[in-house]
Amino acid sequence: MSEFFERNAEVIQRRWPALLARLLVEDVSLLQVDLVEGLGSTLNINGIQLTSRHDRRREAELQADRLPVDSPVQHVYGTGLGDLQLALLARAGLQRLYVHILNGAVFSLILQLLDQLPWLSDPRVELLYAGDLGEIQLPFFALPSELVLADDFNAKIRDRLVSETHLTFNNREFDPQRPEIIERLQACLGWVQADHDVAELFGSRAGQEVFVIATGPSLEQHFATLRAIRNQVERPLFICVDTAYRPLLKHGIRPDVVVSIDQRISDRHLPAENTADIMLVYMPMLDPLVLEGWQGPRYAGFSASPIYQALRRQMPRGELYAGGSVIHPAVDLAVKVGANQITLFGADFAFPGDKTHADWNDGDLGPQLGAAKHWVLDGHGQRIKTQLNFRSYLCELERFIAGHPQVRFYNSGRAGAMIAGTVFHPEFAS
């Protein structure tokens, strides 16, 4: 052990003995570490430069400026080289600083190389692994380098931090004043007025099991099983998302309900032929040509999105949860019709088997496999390719599940992303 590590470890042992035990078993040998010099110096770890190589102190001050000065409690995700912690501890009004470790091996390495006593010894500091808590804490600053370096244990929190950081940017497409949004809402207005209110379905299937079917690649493993169950007299309610509709029909599976919310969905995804016995639940950004052609009952609803604010006042309709993907209102509908057990099919939020969607070609529905630069953990605990928006959708579904403890959620397979709050279905998950 280095002299630095012994002194740093002594403080951690005194204040957080259980945490030190975890740090001692972190495998630092797996890290590729290089010194990077400029006007100052820093470390490059696994190809990621940890901090500025010119002026770490000034960089930390800029990062600290992103946090409210008057907040007595602050959260820092990632330990860096200790610079941000010291910048925040210089604030007289700070009462508690929570430092959340995003990569245990990286922090263990820093403890060996640098004196961290000035912030570790401060009684206002609390130190923990980010993954020890199930949700992010506000207000926070997350060190960009360590969002990239986050290890498997802290990956779920990493995903929530990235999603929260991108929230404003992602919501820019949903400005109620955008001309294309105004035009689409006006085009759908007559349909919303004439169609059923989705709230009419709420409570209609109390105590029934519901299958919610998405379009992840793992859905292909379940076509035969779903077809057999669909043909049974006593069976769960089948709710599918719009892009799963055609693959299901192709394999002889007729859903009971199709949910669609996206302005990019057309009759290519939702062909109207032979739909008389299928319910369509939609939000009024859907292509009016789809509504015009649909032969079965149509149920209109809104989300809490600002784009529906004026319509909600004009003509109240039932509300469904929206978290960026059609999977969210589909699952919320399952809960609101009264399901006490929901099984998810094709809810992968990733690209298992190097495919993007079941029964669609690469790029047909937007994302291409070659653009997958990120990862989540699958049901086997292995890293699997994904993209940032899929990770955000996963975070929002997990938050929804956590808010509905009265419902039992099953995941039908292990090939896709691990979904916190679900258990693997004993019959379907291999």
Image (spheres, helix red, strand yellow):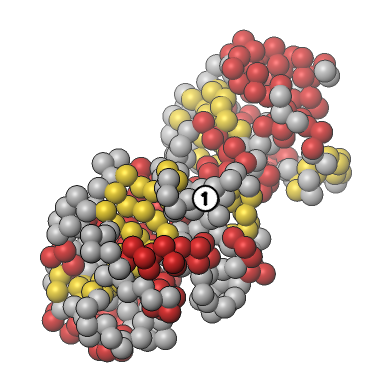
Report if residue 255 is visible in the image. yes
How far from the left and from the top, in percent, is residue 31? 79, 39
Observer-nearest residue: 140 or 360? Answer: 360
Name the residue located 65 percent from the left edge and 40 percent from the top edge.
151
Q: Is residue 331 above or below residue 179?
A: above
Report if residue 116 is visible in the image. no
Left or right, 265 with respect to 384, comes to left
How far from the left and from the top, in percent, is residue 290? 31, 85
**For mark 1, does the 10 Å Cα neighbourhood hold few (<14), some (14 to 19), or many (20 or more) residues?**
few
Name the residue located 31 percent from the left edge and 66 percent from the top edge.
230
Name the residue located 59 percent from the left edge and 76 percent from the top edge.
362
Observer-nearest residue: 89 or 162? Answer: 162
Amino acid type for the residue under numbered disc 1: Ser
Quadrant containing the N terminus in the rendered view: top right
Residue 72, quarter of the rendered image? top left
Observer-nearest residue: 159 or 260? Answer: 260
Q: Secondary structure at mark 1?
A: loop
Residue 79, quarter of the rendered image? top right
Which residue is under mark 1?
Answer: 430
Left or right, 296 with respect to 416, comes to left
Left or right, 10 with respect to 183, comes to right
How far from the left and from the top, in percent, is residue 324? 41, 63
